[in-house]
Image (spheres, helix red, strand yellow):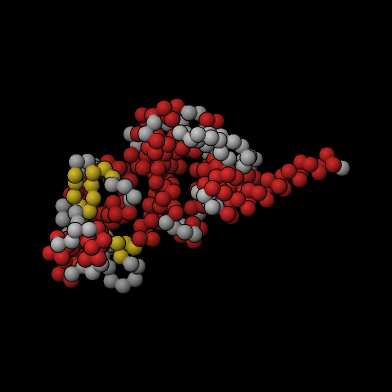
Amino acid sequence: MIEVEECYTEEHIKDALKKVPPHLEKTYRRIFDRIKDRDVSLARRTFTTICLSPVRLDLKTVADMVGLGYPESIIKICTISLVSRSGDKVQTAHFSVQELLVISDENGSHHPCQFSAIDGQIYLAERTVDCILEQTEFLTREEAVNQASFMYAASYWDTHLAALGDVDQAIPGLQAKIDHLFTEPNIYLNRVRAADINEYQDESLWVRVLQECDPPIYRASRMSLIKTVNILFTQGADALLSFQPPNWPWEKNSLTEAAQHGQLDVLILLLSKSLSLTQDMVSPILK
């Protein structure tokens, strides 16, 4: 596309691609049509993962995410006209491919390989949560890093979740799965350690036991997962329990974290629950 080749900033490129030329769209649709019927669903999941991931992914992670046993098959199924490889990383072959793949909504005529952003995020939110929930047994570091989809999910499940807005409306039953991420000890420990070594690039964080990790109610409060916070509190979690996060100079607790991140609903819930608990403890003494 000459228009794109003459653009020198990302903003100008995006403007040029807002309207894909009709002849280019027809070309891509012919390429879509050459994907075998048996592979269309797999190709759609692959395109969704590549386009909506917040980071560039390697072939192994994409293959693991979509349930493909042979990473190299991604290029064969999706074709080099639609995806490209740089080292072990994979991405759409051109800006215009992603512009065509991600449609504004699911109404109207579109190819089965195309998807709306919200439907793509629904798929990725549920897929990443399921990847984490599958690991019910204690994982060693070696076991965890060999499971590419789990390592990706541990770091980015909340990114896809945040894109959904109302969780219950987007995916019925997802809230119960999210609660399990925080209430099941092995699942929580595996996820937190994997996410932290990715974020801080500190391998020593993997050796922590559950008591040395951030309390589940703290992480749920930071994410504004109010229903999960309520369940954790009901199960006896202490919102005032202080701890010191990795590479952080001072201690925090769930209340301070909710306040610092402007999670007003969570803050009000924690304060009301803490006040009610205090009253219940004090009342027998005062009688």
Q: Residue at x 19, y 46 (%)?
A: 85
* The quadrant where residue 147 appears: top left
Q: Can you say which quadrant of the picture contains the N terminus?
A: bottom left
Q: Residue at x 53, y 35 (%)?
A: 250
Image position of 172 with respect to 197: above or below: below
Residue 218 shown left or right of residue 38 in the figure: right
User: Percent x, y for residue 139?
Assistant: 43, 31
User: Percent x, y for residue 278?
Assistant: 73, 43
Residue closest to the far left:
2
Residue 96 shown left or right of residue 197 in the figure: left
Q: Residue at x 16, y 52 (%)?
A: 80
* The quadrant where residue 12 appears: bottom left
Image position of 205 with respect to 99: above or below: above
Q: Nearer the viewer, residue 45 or 260?
A: 260
User: Percent x, y for residue 185?
Assistant: 53, 36
Image position of 278 with respect to 110: above or below: above
Q: Nearer the viewer, residue 140 or 43?
A: 140
User: Percent x, y for residue 132?
Assistant: 43, 42
Q: Can you say which quadrant of the picture contains the C terminus?
A: top right
**Residue 183, visible in the rendered structure:** no
Q: Nearer the viewer, residue 284 or 181?
A: 284
Q: Residue at x 63, y 40 (%)?
A: 240
Residue closest to the far right:
287
**Residue 192, visible in the rendered structure:** yes
